[in-house]
Image (tube, grey):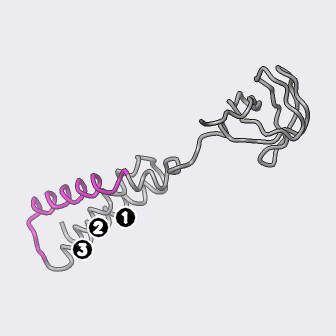
Amino acid sequence: MPWWGWMIIGALLLGSELMIVDAGFYLVFLGIAAAITGLIELAGADLEPWVQWILFSIIALVFMVLFRKKLYAKLRGSGIGYEVGPTGEIVTVEQALQPGETGRMAYRGTEWTVVNTSDQAFEQGQHVQISSVDGLTLKLDAVKTQE
């Protein structure tokens, strides 16, 4: 195949992955491998067609194994070190809450419903810990001290 054929295939594979199909970055690496094969042909290698296809396959496999997981995690996956929710964070209650009582609290720029799940009353201004999140409700517990 001529060098420009590999470049067209590479552009089609890259374009289809990025614009049309969400194939999990497999087509990106196939497109890159096709482009590299085309560049090798452009450089004057003049390889037999079967050698070009083997070269294309090897480049695609090596790039997928070495780079796909890292690139996919960086661009599409969840951020490394990003916590899923606020569970475990320490907050300050804005009103007194008796055990089992529900109230409202500003948290991260939004008003939340809060529930005292502890067996002790919370005073206004007391530091408490978010024990869990249930929908749009923060469940609060007394701060656990580490010994």
In the image, which residues are magenta?
45-69
Q: In which quadrant is the N terminus drawn?
A: bottom left
The amino acid type, in three-letter code, at marker 1 is Ala
Prevailing secondary structure of the magenta residues: helix
- Where does label 2 land, which residue? 35
Which one is in front, 79 or 139? 139
Side of 125 where 30 appears, left or right:
left
Q: Which residue does the image show at 88% across and 33% down from the upper left?
A: 123
Q: Are marks 1 and 2 in contact (CB under 8 Å)?
A: yes
Circle 1 crowding by C-alpha within 10 Å: few under 14, some 14–19, many from 20? some
Check disc 3 and report the residue beneath it: 39
Mark sitting earlier along the chain (1/2) = 1
Residue sitting at x 88%, y 30%: 103
- Count of picture labels: 3
**Residue 49 is inside the magenta segment:** yes
Q: CA distance from mark 1 to mark 2?
A: 8 Å
> Alpha carbon of mark 1 to alpha carbon of mark 3: how far?
13 Å
Q: Secondary structure at mark 2?
A: helix
Residue beneath the point at 44% across and 51% down: 73
Q: Where does the image place residue 104, in percent across and percent down from the top left? A: 87, 34
Q: Which mark is residue 11?
A: 1
| Amino acid marked by disc 3 | Leu
